[in-house]
Image (tube, grey):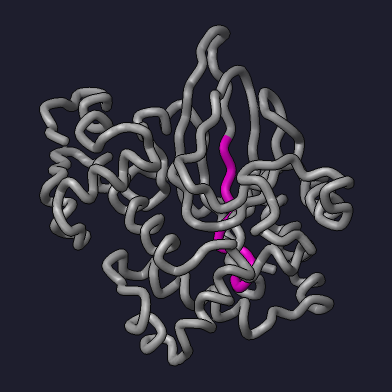
Amino acid sequence: MVRHPVDRPIDVTERSGVLGPANLPLFDAQWFTPAQSVRDVVDTYWSVEWNLPDGTDIDQQVLEFPAVTLSIESGSVPAPFMLTNVQRRAWSRTIRGTGRVFGIRLRPAGLAVLSDLDPSNVEQEHPVTAELDAALTRHLTTIAAETSPSDRAERGDRLIEDLLQKHPITESRLLANAVVDDLAESVRSRTGPALAHRLGVSERAIQRALKETLGMGPKAIARRIRLQEVVRRLSLPDADVSAIAAALDYTDQAHLIRDFKGVAGTTPGQYIRAMPSRGGAEG
């Protein structure tokens, strides 16, 4: 299998959802592209490593893509294996000391290949243990046996290729993948009848597919993806809240402010003013 060991660093200019991108230089954060054969299961692999001075704590927030993420963690972390479900608000963790995290961001169809867990019944962040899911624990243990992030990505590819032979993806779960792809391609994409027409299926089929795989409907998914784009644009120099609201089809600036504050706990203007060398924004 031929792959690129490292694709690129995680950067403020992309839709990563990292709130407070000035923190990124403090971490070694990379994306790893999955093999083509497993891309119906894995959206991306990623790795973050840090080594902070004693007494330095970073309260890091991430407005994550609407996906289930599995992670292998070591150092100053909550548990060796974690499952992060689709988040209703920005994910938050205090980063301190030294640590390493290797993440597997799954496509909507992905969890069912690795686990029997129902995303609707799993907490938003939960340690993965044999008591929770013995098979998933074994899979993560296999990947964790590799040392480097690139080797873990390759091992993940091989493991998932084998699992796909035993657990082929259903049409409903492939539809869920297609829905999220459509909504991610254009943050101004419409849901409802327009989305169903674009995909050639019923609205009910879309609702069922997303509920089965992500535990939420298309409007919530579309809202989350649009907010990720809001974070990206707010993090760039010369960000203008009213211009962002217009460009992303918010009803008005107040609508964007309510949406952003609901997940980030702060207004867009406060977020901009808190960034180094920024200030003066309204909202």
The residue positioned 75% from the left and 59% from the top of the image is 117
47 falls in the magenta region: yes
Residue 234 in which image quadrant:
top left
Decide: is 116 above or below 274.
below
Q: In which quarter of the image is residue 119?
A: bottom right
Q: Is the magenta stretch mostly helix, strand or loop?
A: strand
**Residue drawn 65% across the image and 43% down it:** 102
- What residue span does the magenta drawing correspond to? 39-48
Q: Position of residue 230 (x, y in %)?
A: 28, 49
User: Of 103 and 68, which appears nearest the observer?
Assistant: 68
- The spot of residue 78 in percent (x, y) is 69, 29
| Quadrant of the drawing holding the N terminus | bottom right
Q: From the viewer's perspective, is residue 208 above or below residue 221? A: below
Where's residue 191, x and y in %? Answer: 36, 74
Q: Is residue 30 visible?
A: yes
Image quadrant in which the C terminus is located: top left
Query: Is residue 8 within the magenta segment?
Result: no
